[in-house]
Image: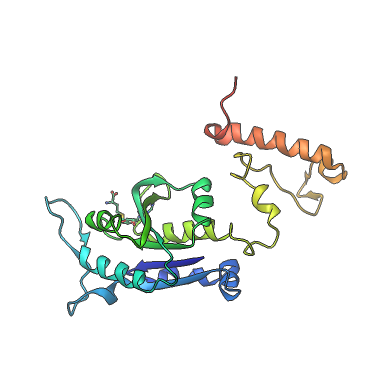
Amino acid sequence: MRIDVISIFPEYLEPLSLSLLGKAQSKSVLEINIHNLRDHTSDAHHTVDDTPYGGGAGMVMLPEPWGEAIDAVLASATGGTRATLIFTTPAGALFHQRRAETLAATEWLIFACGRYEGIDARVAEHFATRAEIDAVLELSLGDYVLNGGEVAAMAIIEAVARLLPGVIGNPDSLSEESHGTSGLLEAPAFTKPAIWRGLEVPALLREGNHGKIAEWRSAQAVERTRAVRPDLLPEEG
Ligand code: SAM
């Protein structure tokens, strides 16, 4: 998979070269390119924002640098691959595991990381009409407001990239975790020692009866989901 990220703070994205995502890039399972939006400005100050039409607080990101920057990324396409262009925004659709799975099945993601009051709305509108773009998505990490789209882009990239074959050592862990095939939260996990600060690991987990362990885990998953995220439980009755 190829991923391009455009930001005014490219150094914010440096952690994408660490850990499993770094290894995936060295194995060529994943290619991540970071671009500086300011390289696509035409004035001496590298201006990327201006006051909002209609008034109001804050600044809005200019359409021209965004247009130039996304055009430049699209111009580097190889083999007719079409991109999914993602605008990270608190005003977007909620990002979740099912969306991560859908995105993991695509070949090329481009992330536009907003700052200030966000990006001029015509940028998304324009690129939705472009033949090189498969889909334009506005995605939110959650119901809160961040200072910029970089953290949101990194979270989405990590959630998507770990689903690519060869990124996670044991692919079974992908289906057995929270938000996996059951849609529930995962049961609590324990490791050695069996007793730590007076707290004992449930005996059943140490007895080696895999059928009973599976039953215990699925009951715990339902109980935990009911307590913390009842909205994730399938409708009962
Ligand atoms: N004025 C915008 C609004 O109310 O919808 C908020 C702008 S926010 C201060 C600046 C940038 O941070 C956004 O353009 C977006 O890229 C990013 N951002 C903030 N919260 C986010 C969230 N929950 N999910 C994804 N991106 C977010």
Would you say 81 lies left or right of 203 here?
left
Total labels: the figure holds 0
Where does the C terminus fall, quadrant-wise? top right
- Report x, y in % for residue 57: 18, 53
Residue 86: which quarter of the image? bottom left
Residue 209: which quarter of the image? top right
Which of these two is toward me, 219 or 196? 219
**Which residue reaches farthest top?**
237
Would you say 124 lies left or right of 222 here?
left
- Report x, y in % for residue 167: 62, 64
Which of these two is toward me, 69 or 223? 69
Would you say 112 lies left or right of 103 here?
left
- Report x, y in % for residue 132: 35, 63
Can residue 134 be seen here? The reply is yes
* Residue at 83%, 39% in the rendered image: 211
Image position of 38 with respect to 204: above or below:
below
Image position of 104 with respect to 175: above or below:
below
- Report x, y in % for residue 44: 18, 80
Image position of 201 with respect to 38: above or below:
above
Residue 108: which quarter of the image? bottom left
